[in-house]
Every structure is written in structure tokens, then in C-alpha cells.
Amino acid sequence: MEELPNCAATCFLSAISNSTCSLFDTACQCSDTALANAAGLCIQAACTIREALKTQNITSHQCGIEPRVDQSFLAPIITFIVIAGIAVLLRPLSRILTHAEFGWDDVCNLLAAITCGVFFGFTIHMTHLGLGLEIWSVIPDNITIIVRGGFVQYILYCVCRFLTRCSIILFYLRVFNSVNARRWLWGAFGFNAFLLFPFMIGLMLQCRPLQYFWTRWDGEHSGTCSHSSTYALTFGIIDVVEDFLIIILPCPFIIRLQLSWQKKWPVAIMFSVGLITLVISILRVLALHNLNYSDNPTLDNGPLVLWSNLELSIGLICACVPTLYPLFRYTVSKYRKVSGGQTTGSSGTKFSKSDVSAQRQTPFYKVGSAESQGELVSQRQGLTGDEAPSWSMNPEISVTSSISQVVEYRGGGGNVLERNDIEMVPIR
């Protein structure tokens, strides 16, 4: 009783005097529901929030009541942050090994990965301070730090999602060259950038002073806040809509591509991962809505933390999928090179292992003029000077608007001397 705040001790003495329990009969006091309810109502009216939480901590310990703990969100978060990290590291490796040029989409992806890593670091730090525990079992000062960490995570979440979408849109701009497609893609890029600034400004102006955002929970500080829950929920819904638009935006242009089924599966994987991200965005909005009605935020914040982390990690994976497919093809070709002897080209010409190696290391994804490609084939087949025929590319092939095409190299007589089923991602 000595450890209790004065306001709580007074309430318990009054409740005990009106019960059948003696002052030192702890077992009776812990089992008397009427006594607990009477003391609780008195403490709620007479004590501050910090004093009430301290009282519940002490009495729960005396009665042998353990706080509920739910930190199950950590395992899936760590799993997907590791997978996302691997995907992000493999992205530049794919660029290097396949001789692809680095672009702004790669820069945005790297910055998004850094932001996601910082977001994850805040999650781990907040968990050590008591996130996932009942609020009465958390040190009051730690509650303030956790709420402040949540404020920082709002900003990091917004920036990471912005950079991830930029990475995806900029990749689309490298692939699609039609005027109509690029017009829509640049419009989506501008819309994405436009939403970032209102959210950031609105977040900073929600509470005055700013620190009232993370100090108002204890009721001991003065300040004003707008409807922060409605604000966060509104932008969460807008975030879901934007994800949906970015997923469906390239679909009409992808459908027009004449892709073999072998080349469709990476596109299908990217689309599927994008749909998963969309579902997680919806689940995050629902978790955000439910948290608004919680009186135990450190415990009930788990679902929001889970879906926020997964949305960022899976978004990064989605942005990396198209760049990992060339690495997969490169690895397969290297395996075949090591395991095979001689290889026969599609035109019937036999190449040695060294010739095949040179052919596979050629950066086909940036297609130049037909004449330069013809010279390249002449060099492969040992034809130089007058021996080399004139070359032309099949006029029906559009190499500027497809991910994958069959390119034919014809001699002066119109005979197909070489045909390549190549991966083409136009680079600017």
C-alpha cells in the first residue's frame, strides 16, 4: 500500500472499508470484483493517467497478474525485410552482370530501401521499449518515446512509399516508348509527387506545439490537435487508391506486347506481388481504423506495425522483380555454358563455348541500328571486310515498345542468318 500513489491509496482504503476484506488480506482483495470496480472508478476520477497506470502495475503484480504480450509481428517483419534486402542487393548485381545501365529507378529503389531499413530499426527499438505489451506494464516515459517513434514512422512510411512508386513508374518509362503510355506514366509520377507534400505538411501541422503529438497521451501537457485519426485514415485510403492505379496503369500496354509464355511469368509475378501489396495496404487502413478506438495502444498497435512494415518490404520486392529476371536468365546461361560443350544457334551455325560466351555477354537489352547489330553478328561468325554481307532488321519488328522480341538478321539475299529471341528493355 505504501508504494501506491496517494490518490490510489486513498481510493483503496475507501473501497476496502466497504468490503468484507481486511486491510492486509491481499488474496481477498484480489478476488473481490466489487472492490476492484469501486477502487477503479475512484482512481479514474482522482488520479492522473500516469498514476493510474502505476497503480495498475503494482496491484497486478501483487495479485500475480501477468501483462499480455503480443510481439508476434516481429517474425514476419524480419522475414520480409531480409527478403527485401536480398532483392535490393541483387538489383545492382543484375545491372552489372547483364551490362544494363543504372537509372533513376535504381536510385529511387535504393533510397526507398534505406528508408525502409530505418523504419524497421524504429520498429525494433519501439518493441524493446514496450510495443506489444499492455500499456500499464510499460514505463510511462517509454510510452512517450513509442508515440514519438510512431510519428517519425508516419513520415518514413510516406517517403518510402513515394520512392518505391517512383522506382516502379521510372522503370515503366524505360520500357514503354509510346507517346500515350509515357503521357500516362508521367501523369502518375506527378500525381505521386503531388500527394507527398500535402501529407507531410498536414502531418507537421496536426498538433501545436508539434511535440504535443507524443505528449498529449498523459493529459498533463497543454496543446491542440486536429482530427489526427481522421487525417491518417483519409490518407491511408488515398494511398490504397494510388497503389491500385499504379498496378493497373501498365496493363493495357503490357497486353499489347507479343510475349511468349516464358516471358510473361516475370510480368505476372510483378503484377501478383503488386496485388499483395494492395491487399496489405487495405489491411493497414483497417488496423489504423481499429487503433483509433483502443484504450491500450501499446498492445493493440501490433497489427498496424505489422502491415506497415510488410507493405514497405513487399513494395520493394515488387519494384525489384523485373530487374531480377535478367539476372535469372544470366545465371541459367552461365550454368548451361559450364555444363555444355558446343551449342548450335537457331540458324544452324555451330558455336564453340567461347563464342557462346561472347554472344550471351552482349548487351542485347539496348538495341541499336540494324547495321550495327549486323556488324556484331559478322564479328561473331568470323566475317569481315568484303565477306560480310549487308544486314537488315525485320521491318515488322518494333524494338522500342516491347520487353521481348525475336530479332532476325538477314543477308543481302534476304536469307535469315541469325535469329535471336532477346530481352529488350530500352535504356535512356
Image (cartoon, rainbow, N blue to C red):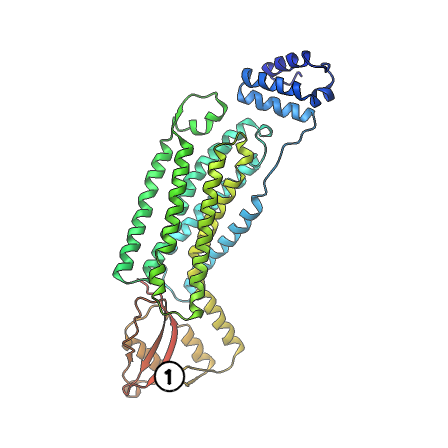
Q: Secondary structure at mark 1?
A: loop
At 39% across and 56% down in the image, what residue appears? 106
Residue 22 in the image: x percent, y percent? 73, 14
As drawn, is 146 to the left or to the right of 199?
Answer: right
The image quadrant that residue 70 belongs to is top right
Extreme-front residue of the structure: 34
Residue 41 in the image: x percent, y percent? 58, 18
Observer able to see residue 104: no
Residue 218 in the image: x percent, y percent? 50, 24
Residue 148 in the image: x percent, y percent? 47, 33
Label 1: which residue?
381
Q: Is residue 273 above or below residue 21?
A: below
The image quadrant that residue 169 belongs to is bottom left
At 49% across and 68% down in the image, what residue appears? 331
At 46% across and 55% down in the image, what residue appears? 273
Tag count: 1
Observer able to see residue 248: yes
Q: Is residue 135 above or below residue 269?
A: above
210 or 414: nearer the viewer:
414
Task: Report the amino acid beneath label 1.
Answer: Gln
The quarter in which the C terminus is drawn is: bottom left
Q: Is residue 378 above or below residue 71?
A: below
Q: Is residue 93 above or below residue 344?
A: above
373 or 47: nearer the viewer:
47
The image quadrant that residue 285 belongs to is top left
277 or 379: nearer the viewer:
277
Mark 1: give few (<14), some (14-19) or many (20+) Cα within 10 Å: some
The quarter in which the N terminus is drawn is: top right
